[in-house]
């Protein structure tokens, strides 16, 4: 795993374990990379519950309960969508903390309003 992420993931795990909390991830553009970073830490099963890789809009709706209206109105890469992704991950897991990410990874797909490299986190 990435040498810069390892200490961050370890510290996250320590903080979660100290509180008795679990983490869930809801990922789109990262394709499970966040979940991979945390599960590379030994003992992470004590504080990592599950990860959702929801690359397509259908997956966001089916797996996380993101509203089709939100997607149609704001798009997959929006604060509104990642908020719903995080809420859905919490509702569909045993976690007390969730992280959600969606973005335009490129090299194409960007627009004037949402350029390549734009990422939304919740």
Image (cartoon, rainbow, N blue to C red):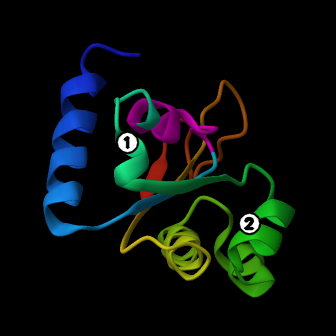
Report the residue at 47% width, 48% height from top. Answer: 119
* Mark 1 or mark 2, earlier in chain: 1
Asked where in the image residue 70 lies, by quadrant, the reply is bottom right
For the residue pair 100 and 106, the one nearer the viewer reads as 100
Q: CA distance from mark 1 to mark 2?
A: 25 Å
One can see residue 95 in this view:
yes
Seen from the viewer's position, the closer of residues 54 and 71 is 54
Residue at the image position 67 percent from the left and 62 percent from the top: 76
* Quarter of the figure with the N terminus: top left
Tell me: residue 33, above or below residue 22: above
Q: Which residue in the protein does label 1 denote?
A: 44
Q: For numbered disc 2, what is the local secondary structure?
A: helix
Q: Is residue 30 rendered magenta in the image?
A: yes
Q: Is residue 110 above or below residue 70?
A: above
Q: Main secondary structure of the magenta part?
A: helix
Residue at screen point 43% across, 47% down: 45
Magenta highlight range: 29-38
């Amino acid at each position: 795993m990435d040498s810069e992420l390892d200490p961050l993931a370890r510290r996250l795990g320590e903080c979660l374990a100290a509180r008795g909390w679990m983490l869930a991830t809801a990922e789109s553009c990262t394709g499970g990379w966040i979940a991979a970073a945390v599960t590379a830490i030994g003992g992470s099963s004590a504080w990592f519950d599950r990860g959702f890789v929801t690359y397509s809009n259908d997956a966001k709706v089916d797996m996380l309960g993101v509203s089709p209206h939100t997607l149609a109105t704001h798009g997959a890469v929006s604060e509104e969508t990642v908020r719903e992704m995080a809420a859905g991950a919490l509702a569909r897991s045993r976690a007390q903390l969730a992280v959600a990410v969606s973005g335009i990874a490129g090299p194409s797909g960007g627009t004037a309003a949402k350029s390549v490299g734009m990422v939304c986190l919740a």
